[in-house]
Every structure is written in structure tokens, then in C-alpha cells.
Image (tube, rainbow, N blue to C red):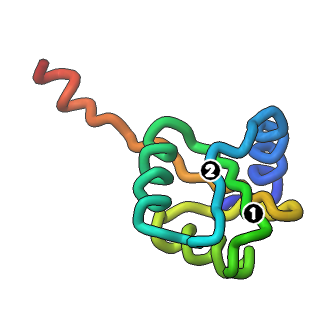
Amino acid sequence: MLSGKEKRQLRAEANQLKPSVMIGKEGVTPRLMDFLEESFNKRELVKLKVLESCPQEIGKIAGQICTLKNSELVQILGRTLLLYRPLPQKSDNAANEG
């Protein structure tokens, strides 16, 4: 779980980020979750924009995504979510074997 200080630091880092994921009228879908998985494999911070057409509540969307993607909610600002998940650790054994 992130501390308040860590969340403040992540919010500062995310200021220049543009939302990379848009959630629309279909809400949380398997395709969206696949895209989020790809995003989290490339970066630790992902910014999502929940469009007006989305039928689900923002808080419920955040909780559902955080649970399914093992991520943490850093911030909800208006209709924008900021999520954090550490990058996967690379195995030292794999580097030594090659």
C-alpha cells in the first residue's frame, strides 16, 4: 500500500501524462483489461479517462480495475483515474543463463 508521500510523488510524476486509456459506453471490458495489462507492462503509472457515456460510477470502475489488475488507485480527479502498479521484476537467473 502506498503512503501519502508516495502518492504525492506519483501525482507529480503524472502531471505531464496524457490519459492513455479511455473508458466509454461499454465500461470495463475484457479488451480494456488486456490493453491495461499491456500498459502496465510498459509503465508503472497509467492515466485513464472515464467518458460521460460510461454507465458505471467512477469509484466502482477504479475498484474493479485495481482488484483485477493488482494495482493501486493513486488519485481520482474529476473523470480521470491515476493507477499505479510496479513493473515486473526481471529475474537475475534469466540474465545469467543467456
Residue 63 percent across, percent down from the top left? 62, 76
What mark, if any, has residue 2 been given in the picture? Answer: none
* Residue ID for mark 2: 21
- What's the amino acid at mark 2? Val
- Which quarter of the picture shows residue 52? bottom right
Name the residue at 69% across, 72% down: 54
Answer left or right for 35 relative to 18: left
Q: Please tell me whether residue 97 is drawn above or below residue 36 in the rendered image.
A: above
Q: Residue at x 84, y 38 (%)?
A: 15
Q: Nearer the viewer, residue 38 or 23?
A: 23
* Dot 1 alpha-carbon crowd within 10 angstroms: few under 14, some 14 to 19, many 20 or more: some
Name the quadrant containing residue 24: bottom right
Residue kind at label 1, given as amino acid type: Leu
Q: Nearer the viewer, mark 2 or mark 1?
A: 1
Q: Picture coordinates of residue 45 (x, y %)?
A: 63, 45
The residue most toward the top is: 98
Residue beneath the point at 56% across and 76% down? 64
Secondary structure category for the residue under label 1: loop
Query: Badge 1 is on which residue?
Result: 51
Is residue 35 toward the left or the right of residue 23 in the image? Answer: left
Quadrant the N terminus occupies: bottom right
Q: Seen in the image, is 32 located left or right of residue 10?
A: left
Work out whether mark 2 precedes mark 1 in sequence or the reverse, and give the earlier one.
2
Coordinates of residue 21 in the picture (x, y in percent): 62, 50
Q: Dot 2, how many residues are within 10 Å of its Cα: few (below 14), some (14-19), or many (20+)?
A: some
